[in-house]
Amino acid sequence: MKRRFTRRTPPILTLGTIAATGMVLYGCGDDAPQDVAFSTPQQCADAGVDAQICEAEYQQALQKHLAEAPHYANLQECEAAIGEGRCFQAGDPGTQNSAGQTSGSGTGFFVPFMTGYLISSALSNLSGYGAYRDYRYSSGYSSTPIYRNRTGDTLTSTISNGQRTSRPVNVNTTTASRYGFGGRSTSRGGFFGG
Amino acid sequence: MKRIAIPERENWREVAESVGFGFHEMYGEPYWVDGAAYAFSLAEIEEAIEAPSQELHDMCMDLVGDVVRDQQAMERLQVPEDMRDLVAASWQRGDKHLYGRFDLAYDGTGPAKLLEYNADTPTSIFEAAFFQYNWLTDNVARGALPEDADQYNSIQESLVEALGAFSREPIFHFAAWTESDEDRGTAAYLMDCAVQAGHRTSLLDIRDIGVDHQGRFTDTEDRVIDLLFKLYPWEDMLREPFAKHLSSAGATIVEPVWKTLLSNKGILPLLWERHAGHPNLLPSFFEADPQAGSLADAVRKPLFSREGENVELIRDGASVEVTEGSYGEEGHVVQGLTRLFETDGAYAVLGSWIVGDRACGLGMREDRSPITRNLSRFVPHIIVD
């Protein structure tokens, strides 16, 4: 049979247009709640989320972190992967408290410090702890623990099919400066691709 | 290969507007041509365009592998000294690339000749991948083209596949010079393909990219940018203030920075050095090379130039045409002159698309001057035997 490149129907555009009026495309609506990163429950409460919710979410995130973050048999291995001073021994889930300090000793494995957690901006709309419990129960929501690796990337880990995988997260941060790209074209009167 | 006339689709302007293709007219001139087409045989497409494009791309990839280990070659390509490690590391890590467009001269006789490789910021992909395809199926449906008319075009499915190879976890940010309808539309089109590949996406202006205290790039909502497509030239980014954050930002950038080596007219003499006499290459030399003077009929091009700016046409050793522009301070190459397909005072250049590492489609542009500029027109093509 003679080779053909095209089909009988043209390709599609998911959004129907390349006019790009709305700048944000999520595929399923623009008003999705955003994840907000906090280092501590206090920072979370300062941002206007119920303090009890902040603490509960922190504990949940920490449990998840201990279960799903990469595990290392000893400190050397962990620090080689994550960076010096960035690991702690986690045999007992209570070893990292909400101020990020470690305590206790004993046997166990080593994991990177949890450097913060992502919680959904939807939580700030909840009226109190009761509403939060209902929300968690009905939506299956849980916050996301985050840690930083040797190169400074912010990561989170998950386990699926028995595989522990780490991935970067689009954490919220504070922009220190902008307009560091585009200057040469500004002087040229605009850039137009070739 | 021939240029044929076919009746315009009566509603093509409405069709264009409805998909956001507002730049079918640019600078007050028609850009999209609905009432004509270039017709090729399948053999011409396969033997004269597809296979050579694939071979040229493979030759280019081999070249990059050598250039990243060669300080002198990096120097000749004007990669800023403090950015060379970044470029080399990007190649050695195997940073994935997305797409590129070869501009080829071909008139239906003899082999196609490589004019240049737009390997970093190619545009006209929406026109080639989507609108030209739409034109074909519309014309077959209304009987203006035969049922078995085809087109060398699997560009969009290749884009969706190639975009699917990038991690779906972070938001895929798309940055462009958004004041340009053409650039914004091109980025929005690629973003649509990314959505089709399962990505969450966000579009921003290249100038709005920020940096946080840890040196990571940020978007306008203060989110860290982990995965970025940018329709903005590397040769400029490497010389701009935020270049110093590139090595620590931790972002995956598409096209990857090693593409700056290919989107550079300096590859033309480097390819010629390695493959002198190759049927798809024209003799090319850096301007300082004494052999450059041996080309009586030639084109002098800046290493970095877009839209045909600062190009000089030389016949019998004398300059016969020069285009204006703001490029050229990084040096020039001189390339042997070749013939373009010409009909009724229009000169055609073939845009042969590479997506991932596969030659997968064609878009034709023609201009009233042998130097293809920003007033060129896009003309669809068909395959008929």
Image (cartoon, coloured by chain):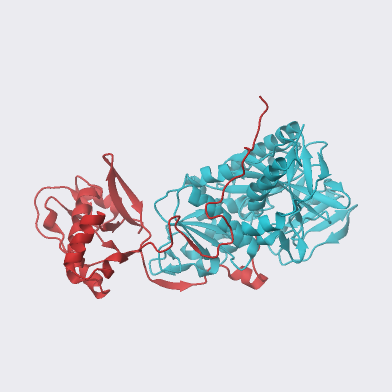
Q: Is residue B336 above or below residue A123?
A: above
Expressed as whole percent of the image width and height from the top left, the position of residue B104 reads 74, 45
Q: Position of residue A26 (x, y in %)?
A: 44, 57
Quick one: B40 or A192, which is closer to the camera?
B40
Q: Residue at x 72, y 38 (%)?
A: B49
Residue A152 in the image: state x and y as whole percent: 35, 59
Residue B324 appears in which quarter of the rendering?
bottom right
On screen, residue A182 versus residue B166, left or right, reads right
Determine whether, in the image, residue B114 is placed left or right of residue B84. Answer: right
Quadrant, the C terminus of chain B: top right
Q: Nearer the viewer, residue B326 or B174?
A: B174
Nearest the eye: B46 or B247? B46
The hue of chain A in the figure is red
Q: In the image, A21: left or right of B139?
A: left
B365 vs A42, left or right, is right
Q: Identify the residue at image location x=64%, y=36%.
A: A5
Q: Residue at x 77, y 48 (%)?
A: B349
- Chain B: its colour in the image is cyan
